[in-house]
Image (cartoon, rainbow, N blue to C red):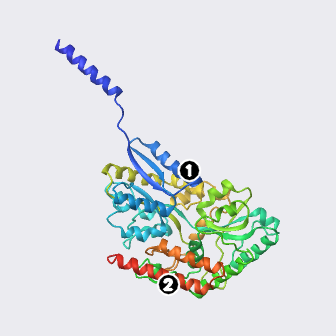
């Protein structure tokens, strides 16, 4: 009788184990700022990682543009509802570094979770943005981009321009844009992200400082110096071209991109990371070139610098989530994953292995011009002027710069007055940030 009871109990236990649900995967919230084609590629990364294992589930959540996303994360942290991962633009690096109690440095995360991680595997031009003075990586490089020149080969042909010869210098670009206008184009060229392209990358490409203290990399006491003679000449030329729409200002952030995609402007200076959206929407053959430079500036062209964003890990999440975050970052670092992300989006490969794999796969041979971004950012060894920027409150400084650029383009201020005002406004913001972070 006892044996029968034991058999019945054991049978019930076995049946219960067969119907009991599997342990739920640990959910990891990933707040991001990517929409459109890029958002779909990001969601694919999360889906592909989730399919490789059953213990963790990365959940991407779109929170608006970069500013909206980081502001949402800050607000959520105060209410203890923050995500484990948040995508933050490179311009907010100094701000995130100052938030020491809120961030879980990536080098510590990967060490604590025993995941393989070597900063030396990442391209120096990218990794250097997100490391401290000791070389420790604080956040995970994700969507790194650099601005390049896009052009409409169909409009080039219509204007009698060589569709295989993009302009290399600013005088050449001006001449090509004039011919495009004469052939009926609504505008010769336009640009997105006005400060990033026309101040920050212009300075790096011409080996000119944006600020002292190695553009802020060496300390918070940097002083803005971009209101120099070369920059004044450049902005003055843009303002002059604006009068006849040889150059046509199209607004801030990405507002210029649709104008190129629709064929209004024959040339577009924009992020390498917008290639996927351009190819998805353009009804013409797209060409690629490097950023133009002024040939009478002796040190040009030097190298461009990155933009885009990085992934920061926030503290005070359950311990199990961090194990999954570390595994996710290890997944993102795999050469085949990085190579596919690079090829499908136009963002830079974050590792040398991903670049080498893309080249070995023949991608650059099949798609001429798609290596321009990498060639440009590695054109020459970076100097203190072209390594990058790390300035406090830089998103606000960019707003001040773009306010003043708009004054110059509208003819309400001279280029020098506009740039002097932008530097003055920016320096006040730097001093405020320095006072608020005395131990940095």
**Residue found at x 56% / y 76%:** 403
Residue 333 shows in the view: no
- Marks 1 and 2, Cα distance to the nearest angstrom? 41 Å
Q: Earlier in the sequence, mark 1 or mark 2?
A: 1
What residue is shown with label 2?
424
The front one of 27 and 15 is 27
What residue is shown with label 1?
40
Q: Is residue 111 above or below residue 27?
A: below
Give the secondary structure at mark 2: helix
Residue 303 rendering spot, x and y as whole percentages: 57, 74
Residue 359 rendering spot, x and y as whole percentages: 60, 58
**Residue found at x 72% / y 78%:** 243
**Residue found at x 19% / y 15%:** 3
The front one of 438 and 327 is 438
Residue 79 rendering spot, x and y as whole percentages: 34, 57
**Crowd class of label 1 (few under 14; some 14 to 19; many from 20; radius 10 Å):** few
The number of callouts visible is 2
**Crowd class of label 2 (few under 14; some 14 to 19; many from 20; radius 10 Å):** some
Quadrant of the frame with the C terminus: bottom left
Q: Is residue 422 above or below residue 91?
A: below
The front one of 412 and 88 is 412
Give the secondary structure at mark 1: helix
> In which quarter of the view is residue 305 placed?
bottom right
Residue, far top: 1
Left or right: residue 416 versus residue 260 is: left
Q: Nearer the viewer, mark 1 or mark 2?
A: 2
Residue 73 shows in the view: yes
Residue 430 rendering spot, x and y as whole percentages: 43, 79
Q: Is residue 171 above or below residue 268?
A: below
Look at the numbered discs 1 and 2 and tell me whether their residues touch, using CB distance below 8 Å. Answer: no
Left or right: residue 65 versus residue 234 is: left
**Residue found at x 75% / y 66%:** 164
């Amino acid at each position: 009788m006892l044996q029968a009871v034991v058999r019945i109990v054991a049978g019930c236990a076995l049946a219960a184990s067969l119907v009991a649900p599997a342990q739920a995967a640990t959910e990891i919230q990933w707040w991001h700022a990517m929409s459109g084609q890029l958002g779909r590629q990001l969601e694919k990364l999360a889906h592909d990682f989730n399919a490789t294992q059953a213990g963790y589930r990365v959940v991407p959540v779109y929170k608006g543009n970069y500013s909206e996303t980081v502001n949402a994360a800050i607000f959520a942290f105060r209410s203890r509802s923050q995500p484990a991962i948040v995508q933050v633009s490179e311009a907010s690096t100094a701000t995130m570094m100052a938030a020491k109690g809120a961030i879980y440095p990536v080098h510590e995360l990967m060490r604590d979770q025993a995941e393989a991680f070597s900063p030396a595997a990442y391209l120096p031009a990218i990794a250097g943005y997100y490391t401290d003075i000791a070389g420790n990586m604080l956040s995970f490089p994700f969507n790194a981009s650099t601005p390049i020149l896009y052009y409409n080969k169909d409009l080039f042909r219509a204007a009698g321009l060589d569709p295989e010869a993009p302009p290399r210098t600013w005088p050449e670009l001006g001449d090509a844009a004039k011919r495009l206008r004469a052939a009926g184009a609504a505008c010769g060229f336009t640009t997105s992200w006005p400060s990033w392209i026309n101040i920050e990358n212009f300075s790096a490409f011409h080996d000119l400082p944006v600020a002292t203290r190695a553009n802020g990399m060496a300390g918070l006491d940097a002083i803005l110096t971009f209101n120099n003679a070369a920059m004044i000449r450049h902005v003055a030329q843009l303002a002059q071209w604006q009068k006849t729409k040889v150059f046509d200002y199209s607004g801030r952030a990405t507002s210029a991109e649709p104008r190129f995609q629709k064929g209004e402007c024959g040339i577009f200076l924009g992020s390498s990371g917008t290639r996927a959206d351009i190819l998805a929407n353009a009804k013409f053959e797209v060409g690629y070139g490097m950023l133009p430079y002024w040939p009478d500036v002796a040190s040009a062209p030097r190298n461009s610098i990155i933009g885009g964003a990085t992934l920061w890990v926030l503290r005070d999440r359950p311990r199990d989530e961090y194990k999954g975050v570390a595994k996710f970052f290890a997944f993102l670092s795999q050469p085949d994953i990085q190579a596919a992300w690079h090829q499908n989006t136009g963002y830079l490969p974050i590792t040398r292995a991903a670049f080498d794999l893309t080249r070995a796969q023949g991608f650059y041979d099949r798609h001429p011009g798609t290596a321009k971004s990498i060639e440009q950012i590695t054109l020459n060894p970076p100097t203190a002027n072209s390594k990058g920027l790390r300035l406090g409150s830089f998103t606000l400084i960019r707003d001040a710069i773009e306010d003043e650029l708009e004054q110059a383009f509208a003819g309400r201020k001279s280029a020098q007055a506009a740039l002097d005002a932008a530097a003055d406004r920016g320096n006040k913001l730097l001093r405020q940030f320095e006072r608020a972070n005395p131990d940095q």
